[in-house]
Amino acid sequence: MPPVPLQWPRWLVWVLLAALFLEFPESLASGRGPNILWITSEDHGIQMGCYGDQFATTPNVDKLAAKGMIYTRVWSCAPVCAPARTTLISGIYPTGTGAEHMRSLAPFPGGKQMFPQLLSKAGYYCSNNAKEDYNLAKPAKVWDDSSRKAHWRQRAPGQPFFSVFNSEKSHESKIRSRPHTPVHDPAKVRVPPYHPDTSEVRRDWAQYYDIVTAADSDAGAVLAQLETDGLAEETIVFYFGDHGSGMPRSKRWPYNSGLHVPLVVFIPEKLKHLRPSDYKPGGRSDRLVSFIDFAPTMLSLAGVKPTSWMQGRAFLGPFTAPAAAVLHGFRGRMDERNDLVRSVTDGRFVYIRNYMPHLVCGQHIDYLWQTPTTRVWESLHREGRLTPEQDAFWKRKPPEELYDLQTDPDEIHNLASTPAYQIIKARLRKAQREHATMIRDVGFIPEGDRLDRAKGGSPGDFSHDARKYPLSRVLKTAELASELRAEDVPALKAAMKDRDSAVRYWGALGLLMRGSMAVKSSAPALRSTLNDSSAEVRIVAAQALCQFGPDADFKASVRILAGHADWSQHDVFTVMAALNSLDALGMAFAPLAEILHSLPTKGVSPDSRYDSYVPRLVEHLQRRFKK
């Protein structure tokens, strides 16, 4: 006998349906997800009226915040646009995909997609006006329209949209655009204690506030269009900046000043079922939020369960997850200058791990030096006219830094060696190491080497194979190298014999970072490394011997560096590394400056995003070491 169909009383069916409509009224009533609008602006932090900055003039975002909610603890992961935007679009940490450098291009990890592609599958019209600047190659079509004309108005009737409008008005380049008549009075600017208080610095800060106002006006124009189209009450609006201010020591540095961004979210009453429990108009949330959380959050709002490979946590919608205990930031190569920094915050304390402490914060970057503040800051350093807090930017970095944002919001008093803070430092250091291990941070492999190991695929794929990437050995050696303890020299010399080139690289770099005594006592080991199979290892060994080794090693080591700086013979990564090493030699290299004037400034690179870096380095060195 066939089973008897279950017969529910009609009244019970209606009660259940009514309950569902009360819980999810918009999504069920319309059969679609909510509209989502991103209004983004470049290169500015929380210098806004709604965040309590009374010097700022931001009426449009302030009005949005009055009816929406402010998030007070948001980090962009990266303190510069390309890797920050890569984090947003992918939902994966760039440090785990080989996409952390400014700028670079790596293949997208296999079997994964950028989140607008997943929204498109859910029926969304996805438009981007207009900046992309991703360090990951797009896996097939991502946007329905990504252009200066992109707009939600091009969608099909009744189709939900995800639309991005980005303002370039507050970009770093606009700080130094002249002529400009200041609107905000330079005399009334608050100059942070790490900057010298000069007329040039005050002028740049005042102009920064002016361009933030211009970005606010762009936001107001988009919000007005939403009102005109009658969509304001059925659209979730996000306003945020892509990283900290475009002023030096904010943009490009993974301090709170470079990573802390404004985030205002408005969820209309019709969509209140998507609000978090702490949402209230004009309210504030102290939840820790990172750019890594945006992709899963957009999926959650659309009613799509975030994919398991996304590394963030949804903070809105039905798939909201518990907040993270800490946020992570990073700094890799910045244009033509190499570096490796990782940072962590729990909302109050900021921990910085400098894996290349021999490099000063103020490495010469052509684009950065176009800002008047940078030039006058460097000039005062050379003249010895800076306070210790201001001069720190131009000196070697400590291996670790720790700042208390509650008592020191400008992050100028390093507590890393203060006894009372050792437990806090150890906790955040542990969080940073566990994070690097969890995401398989490939930043510890030199850039060219990681692409070679990937063999045309994504570094984010090969990195999970311990045979191709012995992360535990590499990370341990990087930690030994950067901690600068004299007693670790024997371990570093032993690392230079490891079968993995990244371990050998950190072994040699650890000796270089320790200077004269370590290099001279290890000179035979470094000489043998000049023939290493890895160009990156050869370059580090040659720099160490040139800079700190016996005089007899200088000429041979310089020839190696000069040879590796020839773009007609080596890849762009090798050439950049060699040119940076030659620059580090300083006046010791001056007698051989004629070498620079024969170096080619064109060569082969994996993508045009890399093409400007070698010419910038060569031109800088030619100016520094004239014939």
Image (tube, rainbow, N blue to C red):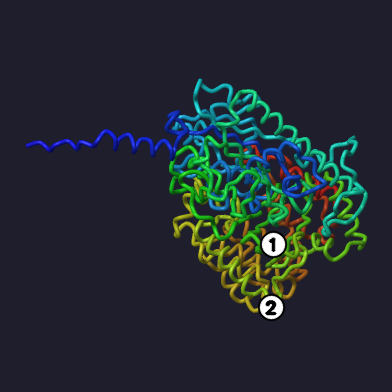
Q: Rounded to the nearest whole Å, what is the CA distance between mark 2 and mark 1? A: 39 Å
Is 201 on the left or on the right of 277, as rendered?
A: right
Q: Residue at x 49, y 25 (%)?
A: 159
Q: Specify the label residue 542 is tagged with.
A: 1
Q: Specify the label residue 419 is tagged with.
A: 2
The residue at the far front in this view is 11
Q: Residue at x 63, y 68 (%)?
A: 481
Is the Cβ of the residue at disc 2 closer than 8 Å to that at disc 1?
no
Number of marks: 2
Q: Specify the label residue 118 is tagged with.
A: none
Amino acid type at image mark 2: Pro
Q: Earlier in the sequence, mark 2 or mark 1?
A: 2
Q: Residue at x 57, y 36 (%)?
A: 268
Q: Which of the 4 quarters of the picture holds residue 111?
A: top left
Nearer to me, 200 or 614 = 200
Q: Position of residue 262 (x, y in %)?
A: 68, 46
Q: Position of residue 378 (x, y in %)?
A: 86, 55
Q: Specify whether residue 496 is in view.
A: no
Picture layout, residue 433 above or below residue 63? below
Secondary structure of the residue carrying tag 2 is: helix
Is 205 on the left or on the right of 435, as rendered?
A: right
Picture layout, residue 333 above or below residue 547? above
Q: Position of residue 126 (x, y in %)?
A: 54, 30
Nearer to me, 278 or 127 = 278
Picture layout, residue 151 above or below residue 382? above
Amino acid type at image mark 1: Ala
The residue at the far left in this view is 1
Secondary structure of the residue carrying tag 1 is: helix
Q: Specify whether residue 74 is in view.
A: yes
Q: Which of the 4 quarters of the picture holds residue 359?
A: bottom right
Q: Which of the 4 quarters of the picture holds residue 360?
A: bottom right
- Mark 1 Cα shell of 10 Å, populated few (<14), some (14-19), many (≥20): many
